Structures are given as structure tokens and as C-alpha cells.
Amino acid sequence: MSTTLDPRPVTPARLAWLRTQLDSWETDGLLDDAQAAAILDSYHPSRRFGLTGLLFSIGAIFLGFGLIWLVAVNYEHLSPSVRFGIVAGLWLALLVGGEALHVRRSVPAAASGAIRLLAAFAFGAVVFQAAQSLQVPAYEPALVGLWGLGALAHAYAVGAIMPLAVGIAASLGWYLWVVLWDSTSSLSGVLSLAVAAVVATSLAALHERWLPRFADAWREVGALLALAAMFWAALPFAGPGGFAWSFWLVAGLALAAGSAVAAVLLSRGTTRLEPLVAVGAGVVSVALVLWEAVGTGDGGATFADWAQVSLAVAGYAVLAVAVAALGTLRDSWRLTALSTGALVVFTTVQSFAVFAQIIQGAWLFVVLGLVFVTTGYVFDRARRRLARNLTEVS
Amino acid sequence: MRKRIALVAVVQLACVLVAVAPQLSARAAGDEYRLAVAPIDPIDPFRGAYVTLDYPGIEGADDGRSGELYVSLVRDGDLWRPGPISRTRPDSGPYLACDDTYWQVRCGIESWFVPQDEAARLERKLWESGAVATVKVDGRGNAAIVALDPR
């Protein structure tokens, strides 16, 4: 029995990828012309698909935060156990419903993805409602960590991207919270971000081999964290004062070292360079914080101050170029946009922090404009050259 | 797929149980003790308004260390009050299992979550007359606050 299906909408980029794959499979003798054409005919390009997915996701994020906010409102008309029952029922319905819809494909993939995302938020609401009902003390970071752990379990059990995003965000929030709770030093913050960046980048490299569907998410989070660590390290006030080692910081360092070694040994091609870049960025970030040269008192900026700022600017530019090149290599517009946005914010902050001490008024803006134009030109040339070299190597 | 969904549900429920285990154990298997408290008032971003409770007499051990801490409870008329503090678990109860790693000694009974309006009203009332917290404590020192009444 043959059935005729309506062509399904996919993004133009995904359709282009499918064409390339079909050509490759035809060359390998896996498909003939008719089969390849039949597969291609069952899809049509549509940009609405991406827009629909974006709207569904944004809607689910608003609903998810709204649900957690409803828990925080603590409605007195309902007893704590009734509130817990309602939230738990909603979570279970969303978990089962999202997976059922995904398997049956009776709704667009974007819709079932949004329901999975909402289920991950609803699980957080269950954790917080249970803790509220049983009067678990406030500001308990373990609740956020357990939310992340549960969302990650959901993601890996069914291969769902949306719960993975929630799981990574909550787990990361928990880790930064417990580290900074123990020691509110800039060095603790930078070190925890750098450690998380190395773990995320290494996991991306390992996923690339065994679970490529999840690799992009870990890679993008790793890039964001590495950029954030160096941004913090380059701020004039970032120093090692008040730093204290804690259990979670040491555990994070051990995990980062283990995962980086595993990623370098087990991944292939240029992918194995990614954890090394994250490690290098982390070392430079920590070195910048330890330097602690900036301390412009009455005597103004010293040579050491300028040297530290120069290292920070050069290090950040190199890291941004590496992320942009990775975006080109991986065909990820998100990585390219991240590196560009990060460089613009960094250049603006550093320019005002450094040049505003010497130049004021109209000339400040003229100099800033020149800095932006020069940085943009150098950045673009370096990105293209690095991406070309990496492509040739791989 | 059904097995996987069931597995996700079980793992996530286990996470919820871990999150509330001390309070659940105390409520299910603990005995009730009434302790005097004084209020302080803030907001938790995930769970809303609450009153932070300060228990006079519960404080960190003055031994230059931090971590696990055990506070024995001693009867004082109608109420119970904190007694001897030690780093080792007492042989017999009742006692609270606490932690003084951070600035505040945490025994699992420092927050009382209530609706926003109720929090402000309760805080005023407690400042005027003080309060008594009814706390359930199990054999391992896990504690859960079950009621808060003005004195």
C-alpha cells in the first residue's frame, strides 16, 4: 500500500543539506534517482518553519517562567498539598503528552518541541512547589541543581534538545551559585566560568562522535562561557582578593581536566582542538585576574596597566576570532553572531574603561569609531583565514 | 518509548524526593518541638515571599571550623531551646543536624513561606510579640517547620 504525504516544511539550509546527502547516497549506490527524487519531493523549503519554531519556543519559555512564578505567588486559597498535586499533574501531562505527540508526529515538530520545553520547566515548578510546601529553607542551590539534573535525564532519555537547553542552563546556574556562595571573589567567578567552558566544550567534542544531535548545544554554551570568563577577567576591578578554594571548584577542575583529556583522545580531526582552545582561554583568563596590575591611583595608568589591558584585548580578540571561525566551520550562525556580539560589547566596555581616562568629548567618539572599524577589519580577515586553514586541515 | 517516559518520570520524581528528603523525613517520622523564634523578611526568586526565622541560641561553634554541626534541644517550660552544640552527632536526641559552612547556621527550619501580603502582616506581628515555631525532628536530626504561631 502506498500513501501520498503532503510535503513537509523545512528550512532552506536543511533542505540544502538533504540534497547534498542524497547525492552522496546515490554515489554510494544506496539510492537510485527515483528514490532520491521521492524523498526530496516530500519536503519543501519554508522560512515560516523557523519562525514558527521560534514563536513556539518563546511562548513555551514565557509559559514556563509564568508557571514557576505562579508557584512563587504561593496562593493561599489552595492548600500546599493541593498546589503540589496540580503542578505535579501538569508536569506529568506535559511530559507524557510531549513525548506522545513527538512519536505520533500529529503536530509540527516545533509544537512538540515547545511542549517538551514546557515539561522541563514544569519539572522545575514541581521541585520548587515541593520545597515550598515542605518549607525547605530559602536560597537552596541544590533545588536548581536537581532541576537541571532532572531536565538532563529527560533530554538524554528521549533525545530531546529543548530539555537539554533547560538542563544545561539550570545545572550551570547551580554550579556558579555554589562556587560563588563559597567565595565571592572575581577569581572564583572567572575560574568557575572557565572550568564550565572546558567541560562544555569537551562534552561537545565527545557528543560529536557518539551523539551529534546534542553537540551544537554544548559547543555554543562552551563558547559563551569562555567568552564570559575572559570578559570578566579583563574588567579593571577583577582581582584575586577574597579567593578561597572550595570542594565544588576543585571537583569542577578535576572534571574539566578529565573531560578535556577524554575529548582530545577520543574525538577526531579539528574537533579535538576545541577543548584545547577552551583550556587556553581559561588559562589566559585566570592569568589576567592574577595579574591585578590595574590600580590607577593619583599617578594615572602605568606601563603594567597598559600591558595588562593589551593582553586582555589581544586575548579576547583571538578567542572571538576562534569562535567565529568555528561558527564558519560548523555552519553555525549562532556561534558567528555570538563572537561578533561579544567582541562589540567587549570593545565598547574596554574602550570606555581605557580611553576615557585620557581622551574626552568628541575625540573619545572619534577614537572609539576608529577602534571599532579597525577591530572589525582585523577580526573579519583573521576569521576568514583561520576558517580556511581549518577547512584545509580537516 | 513508554518505558523511557516512565524512566524519566521516576528519575525526576527521585530528584524531587532528594530535594525535600530532610523535611519529608522529619514530617513523616519526627516528633514535635516548640521553639521561640524572631523574624527577618525577604523573597526567594523561585518560591516567593517568606519570613526568615532566627532561633536565639542556635549559633556556629566557636572552634575555628565549619561544616556539620549538631544542636541538642533542651526542654524549657512549655518550649524547647537550643542546648549544647557539638561537631559530633549526639548519642541521643532530640537534636538538630545543622551546617555552619556559610554565614548563617542552617538547620532546615530557617524559612517560613507564605503569600506576599501574609508575609508582611506576619512579620509585623512577630516583631511585636515574637513567635513559636512548631518543628518536627526525626531521629537523625532532620527538621521541618510545620507551624508558626504568634506568642
Image (cartoon, rainbow, N blue to C red):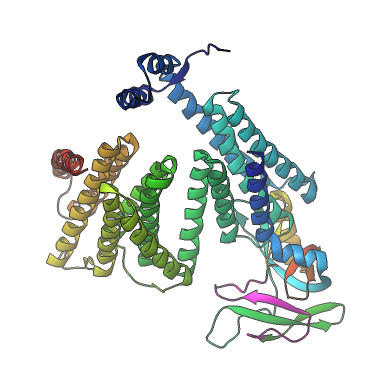
Residue B75 seen from this side: yes
Single out the residue that lies furthest toward the right. Answer: B78
Residue A11 picture location, percent across and down: 40, 23
The magenta stretch spans which residues? B86-107
Residue B151 seen from this side: no
User: Which residue is at 36% across, 21% downward?
Assistant: A12
Residue A151 picture location, percent across and down: 56, 47
Question: Is residue A259 placed above or below B134 in the rendered structure?
Answer: above
User: Which residue is at 83% across, 82% downward?
Assistant: B75
Asked whether, in this view, residue A353 is left or right of residue B16, the answer is: left
User: Which residue is at 57% across, 30% downward?
Assistant: A112
- The kind of secondary structure the magenta stretch mainly shows is loop
Depth check, front residue: A319 or A27: A27
Asked whether, in this view, residue A54 is left or right of residue A355, the answer is: right
Badge count:
0
Quadrant in the rendering for residue B138:
bottom right
Depth check, front residue: A358 or B36: B36
Residue B104 among magenta residues: yes
Quadrant in the rendering for residue A27:
top left
Question: Is residue A260 placed above or below A28 in the rendered structure?
Answer: below
Quadrant in the rendering for residue A338:
top left
Asked whether, in this view, residue B103 is left or right of residue A301, the answer is: right
Residue B148 picture location, percent across and down: 79, 63
Residue A388 picture location, percent across and down: 17, 39
Asked whether, in this view, residue A99 is left or right of residue A23, the answer is: right
User: Which quadrant, please, contains the N terminus of chain A?
Assistant: top right
Question: Is residue A193 placed above or below B61 in the rendered structure?
Answer: above
User: Which quadrant, please, contains the C terminus of chain A?
Assistant: top left
User: Which residue is at 17% across, 48% downward?
Assistant: A360
